[in-house]
Amino acid sequence: MSQPRLATKQDMPRVLELIQELATFEKEPDAVEVTLQDLENDGFGTIPKFTCFVLENDAIIEGIALVYPRYSTWKGQVLHLEDLIVSKASRGKGLGTQLLDAVVKHAQSLGVKRVSWEVLDWNEPAIDFYESKGANVMRDWNVVQLNEKAIASYINNIK
């Protein structure tokens, strides 16, 4: 098994496969709207919107961690971990730890004040993993979102 490395544009087809695998695991198999072209353009354009780390086993990408910058009014610059995904076949082999290590090292190199992410409340293995690494799982906070349809509806209701 190799060490995590920065993803390349050529890795994006496998990255998309792992994103779809995660969506299926999270019981949302039809929710993935991002396309291969989106990932290639957004990750490798003039101003990349995200950084992605990949981890290979036998020359096949078996894990990814996708991050992007955020700004906290309380803390300043933070790093958001959008997804840390390890293929079902490779779970329990330490890949998640290696990817999280890469993210935290990256965060430190950027000088951020915090790394933040969400985890589903029913995903106890992930919660246990993150807590074992020293993460604070804040169960008293709720994730709030407006999807594309809700944005349009909101805009239509502004007077």
Image (tube, rainbow, N blue to C red):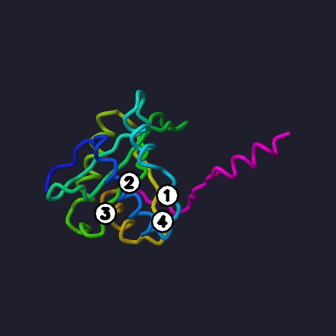
Badge number at residue 32: 1
- Mark 4–mark 2 distance (CA, rounded to whole Å): 20 Å
Badge number at residue 136: none
Q: Give me the residue at 51% from left, 67% from top.
A: 28
- Mark 3–mark 1 distance (CA, rounded to whole Å): 29 Å
Q: Quick check: marks 2 and 1 in contact, CB under 8 Å?
A: yes
The amino acid beneath tag 4 is: Leu
Which residue is denoted by mark 4 in the rendering?
120
* Pointer 3 or 1: first along the chain: 1
* Pointer 2 or 1: first along the chain: 2
Numbered disc in front, either 4 or 2: 2
- 141 drawn magenta: yes
* Pointer 4 or 1: first along the chain: 1
- 136 drawn magenta: yes
Which residue is denoted by mark 3 in the rendering?
132
- Mark 2–mark 3 distance (CA, rounded to whole Å): 28 Å
Q: Quick check: marks 4 and 3 in contact, CB under 8 Å?
A: no
- Mark 4–mark 3 distance (CA, rounded to whole Å): 17 Å
* Pointer 4 or 3: first along the chain: 4
The relative height of residue 44 versus residue 136 in the rendered view (above or below) is above
Across and down, in percent, residue 46 comes to 41, 27
The amino acid beneath tag 2 is: Leu
Q: Which residues are magenta?
A: 135-159
Location of residue 79 by image quarter: top left
Question: Quick one: label 4, few (<14), some, or many (20+) residues within 10 Å?
Answer: few
Q: Give me the residue at 35% from left, 40% from top.
A: 51
Which residue is denoted by mark 2 in the rendering?
16
Dot 3: element: helix
